[in-house]
Amino acid sequence: MEKAIILLLKEIYYPFLAVIGLPVNLIAIVILSRGNCGLSRCISLYMLAMATADLLVIIINAYFVGKWSPKETQV
């Protein structure tokens, strides 16, 4: 039986998002944690928190999607 289109998109989209998102967020965290990027301290801390949260979401999502993705059922 064929997989649904949404499951195929999910199998392609999430790994692609993780491959792009991981290094970008790591670079953002490094740059923002130095503190001399030309932004105010408050904005830098806010952006650092957003980059960290996004990195955690990507890691957790990639783990759970890869581990608990729906299996095909035989009908």
Image (cartoon, rainbow, N blue to C red):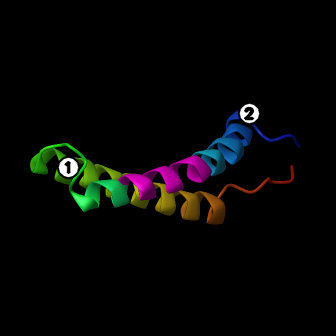
**At 71% across and 43% down in the image, what residue appears?**
12
Horizontal side of 68 relative to 48 (left or right) equals: right
Question: Which quarter of the rendered picture does the N terminus lie within?
Answer: top right
Which label was assigned to residue 44?
Answer: 1
Task: Estimate how packed mark 1 is, as few (under 14), some (14 to 19) or many (20 or more) residues with alpha carbons within 10 Å.
Answer: many
The percent position of residue 5, horizontal first and vertical second, equals 74, 33
The percent position of residue 15, horizontal first and vertical second, equals 65, 51
Which label was assigned to residue 68?
Answer: none
Helix, strand or loop at disc 1? helix
Q: Residue furthest top?
A: 5
Which label was assigned to residue 5?
Answer: 2
Horizontal side of 36 relative to 20 (left or right) equals: left
The percent position of residue 50, horizontal first and vertical second, equals 29, 50
Front-most of residues 39 and 6:
39
Q: Which residues are magenta?
A: 18-28
Of pointers 1 and 2, the one earlier in the residue sequence: 2
- Residue 13 lies in magenta, yes or no? no
- Residue 27 lies in magenta, yes or no? yes
Q: Amino acid at mark 2?
A: Ile
**At 44% across and 58% down in the image, what residue appears?**
26
Q: Amino acid at mark 1?
A: Ser
